[in-house]
Image (cartoon, rainbow, N blue to C red):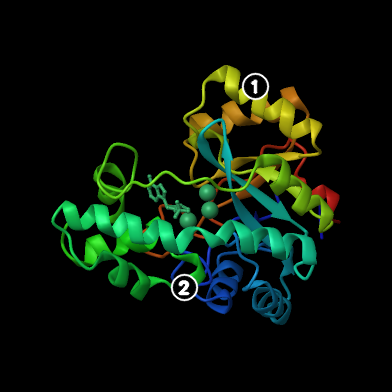
Amino acid sequence: MTSKSSLNADLHCHSVVSDGTLTPEQLAERAYSNGVRLWALTDHDELGGQERARAAASSLGMDYLSGVEISVTWMGQTIHIVGLGIDAAHAGILEGLRRTREGRGNRAQQMAEQLLKAGIPGAYEGALHFAGNHELISRTHFARFLVEQGVCRDTDQVFKNYLVEDKPGYVPHLWATLDDAVAWIKGAGGVAVIAHPGRYKLSAMQMDELYKHFKEIGGMAIEVITGSHSPNQYQTYGKIAQHYGFLASRGSDFHDPEESYIDLGALPHLPDHLTPVWSLFH
Ligand code: AMP
Ligand code: MN
Ligand code: MN
Ligand code: MN
């Protein structure tokens, strides 16, 4: 594996094991044919797809890092921490993720009750029908149900009018703590990465505190080039990586061929002056 910034690495995407629509094998093939040469599947709060993803990558001759995207509550907001290069059979992270998934069923029932009051019946069963993994029922599955029902044109419209704060179907939820998530990743021998930092509704001061605290507890990297960032944000978070001494990561956050703006492997390369997170793994 090369540690060059120009390596086509895609270290963030989702399969049917969380809220993606392709299997680990389909993702591996799509990634490889799009030119990806280092890949990680990072399902939400779940390692159930790792063996399949690694096997599929290996049969294509594509380097692979085990991955996960952990849901975390930080200062009252949901943030996501990606773990890369973890031992996917490590008991500590498996137990931590199991606990993180636990509240999803109950939350989904409450979301459905709210939607019913808003005149949309059958959302729990409807969302569950889209969930490849019933332990991982997510807002994305509700979004697909609302599109199927003709309530919204596409999932983008859903996340503007439903399932978000102050809109029908939003249920606040307490996820893992930042300290626990980073400890599970490190305990499993992996590297913790702040996912899509440009997406959080945190003030500059809160973000500064997040970076400092994350670094203090052993977090090492942030996503710079991601499907969730605009080209302007590539610059902003490249500078943040340099300023705080973080390694830089790159990942499409691909979920589905129609829903996702950016295909696997189709992002710009990491800028030369940043140190890629994969330099730790060569
Ligand atoms: P959950 O973990 O159940 O809260 O669901 C979070 C998932 O919903 C994310 O991983 C995305 O896949 C999707 N999502 C959240 N916000 C948006 C948005 N604004 N546009 C599209 N998808 C979103
Ligand atoms: Mn998702
Ligand atoms: Mn995310
Ligand atoms: Mn993601």
**Measured from the top left, where is residue 122 in percent x and y?**
22, 68
**Measured from the top left, where is residue 178 in percent x and y?**
67, 41
Please name the residue shown 52% across and 69% down the image: 15
Q: Is residue 205 above or below residue 260?
A: above
Instruction: Name the side, left or right, on which 156 lies relative to 90.
Output: left
Quadrant in which the C terminus appears:
bottom right
Name the residue tied to disc 1.
208
- For the residue carrying disc 2, how many other residues have a C-alpha within 10 Å: few (<14), some (14-19), or many (20+)? some
Q: Nearer the viewer, residue 87 or 118?
A: 118
Q: What separation in Å lies between label 1 and label 2 (alpha carbons)? A: 36 Å
Q: Is mark 1 within 8 Å of ligand 3?
A: no
Q: Is residue 61 above or below residue 275?
A: below
Instruction: Name the side, left or right, on which 197 lies relative to 54.
Output: left
Q: Nearer the viewer, residue 8 or 138?
A: 138
Please name the residue shown 51% across and 66% down the image: 18
Name the residue tied to disc 2.
134
